Image (spheres, rainbow, N blue to C red):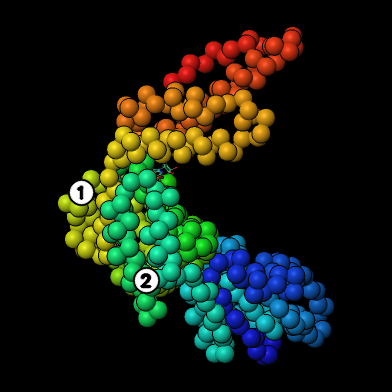
Amino acid sequence: MPSESTKVTIYYGPLSWFEQKVIEGEGEGLLEAVFDHDERQREHRFFQGDAERPEREAPPRLPRLIAKSGDYASLNEHVISNFPGLIGALNVAALHLHNPPEQVRSHLQRAFPGTVVERYEYPTMTRQKLLSFRDGFSAHLVGQENVRDQLLAALYPLTRPSRNKPVVIMFYGPSGVGKTETARFVNDLLGGEMMRKQFSMFHSENFASYVFGGRHSDASFARDLLDRESGVVLIDEFDKAASVFHSAFYQFFDGGVFEDKNYRADVGRSLIVCTSNYGSEQEIHDALGDALSSRFDALVPFEQLAEEEVRTVMYQMVDAQLSQLETPEKQLIDADDIKTRLEILVRKGANIRRLGKITTQVISMMLVDASLLEASESGDPDEGPSQSSVDMP
Ligand SMILES: Nc1ncnc2c1ncn2[C@@H]1O[C@H](COP(=O)(O)OP(=O)(O)OP(=O)(O)O)[C@@H](O)[C@H]1O
Ligand SMILES: [Mg+2]
């Protein structure tokens, strides 16, 4: 093994930031280097009789090796557990690693004590952004004034530069009343694409390895945290996670550190929002137990919207969807007509998400009808009937 040392730099943060720091074209990727190395190892050498067997030549010095977060998944476990050995065998001069597994970091730091660690500075809450939150809330969310006021108080500690742990908040209440939308609004004030995980997406078996860690190639919550771009971590449908997983979140909620078998992430002064459809604080305590529910800094209830508020949201949705259409399409459709058609659903207290879908359907149906009518009036024999047979709601 070559005796020359390697200059190691480890980067913790989003991929886009890593790629800015370490320009890809100026180095070799880990996977290609390992592949070339394996090829060389496979080379057969034949010796006759007592002929002297020369040592294999060390590979030429590799000036710069780059590994990204996703690359470790393709390596065998034994390569990961002896990463400094691989780096020695590859004869690397400068190594740049993005979000490596813990084992890789600790072995490298032992083998190369000069290892440098750089961390991305995530966007944080400031008093100025808190003001923008207060003043911009009603333009993004209809109603829910209590949510705005409670959140202002809950977010305030994040404006202190000395704070080094997250604020953890549970949003609870009925479906389609603005929980996810509120988290998105806060994240937009901070910047970066919001990390959003839906816990209902994972079946129990996958979920165990997602939370506690499995093979390096398995999806991992800790690695997703390391890769995240945003200062807000949104865990949607927290109520869908089985209680055996609750203990995995104690340390995370207390101090912002999430560790699994392979990775360790420290989110520091971030906002963690969990959403759920619990109906009351009591229900949260009963379902999550004291140990977990007491770790939330705030439990924020979202109210069912009043009829007038649902109407306002529906109007906003119709206007937003119409603004996305092409100009000739816009001329075929009358916004007031759509709003009148949807009024009955508002009166029936329809779920907003359903209203959104139906708005899309109604707009599409009206476009189809109007364009077929136009075609039949222009006398195109290939076109169908002048009215579609789809019933409007
Ligand atoms: N109070 C509100 N003001 C404006 N828009 C809203 C409001 N509530 C919901 N919406 C709109 O309805 C849609 C669904 O809202 P959102 O995803 O925030 O629901 P949710 O409360 O997270 O529901 P769930 O519990 O089902 O996840 C979004 O497109 C959002 O824009
Ligand atoms: Mg939601």
Q: Is residue 361 above or below residue 117?
A: above
Q: Which residue is pictured at 46% across the width and 39% down the height?
A: 316
Q: Is residue 64 left or right of residue 320?
A: right
Amino acid on which disc 1 is placed: Ser
Q: Is mark 1 within 8 Å of ligand 1?
A: no
Residue bearing the label numbered 1 = 280
x and y, in percent, of residue 241 in the image: 33, 51
Q: 233 or 221: nearer the eye?
A: 233
Q: Is residue 23 above or below residue 367?
A: below
Amino acid on which disc 2 is placed: Leu
Quadrant of the image occupied by residue 158: bottom left
Q: Which residue is pictured at 51% across the width and 86% down the height?
A: 110
Secondary structure beneath dot 2 equals helix
x and y, in percent, of residue 301 in the image: 26, 51
Q: Is residue 327 left or right of residue 273?
A: right
Q: 360 or 292: nearer the eye?
A: 360
Q: Quadrant of the N terminus?
A: bottom right
x and y, in percent, of residue 374 in the image: 68, 16
Q: 25 or 359: nearer the eye?
A: 359
x and y, in percent, of residue 173 in the image: 28, 46
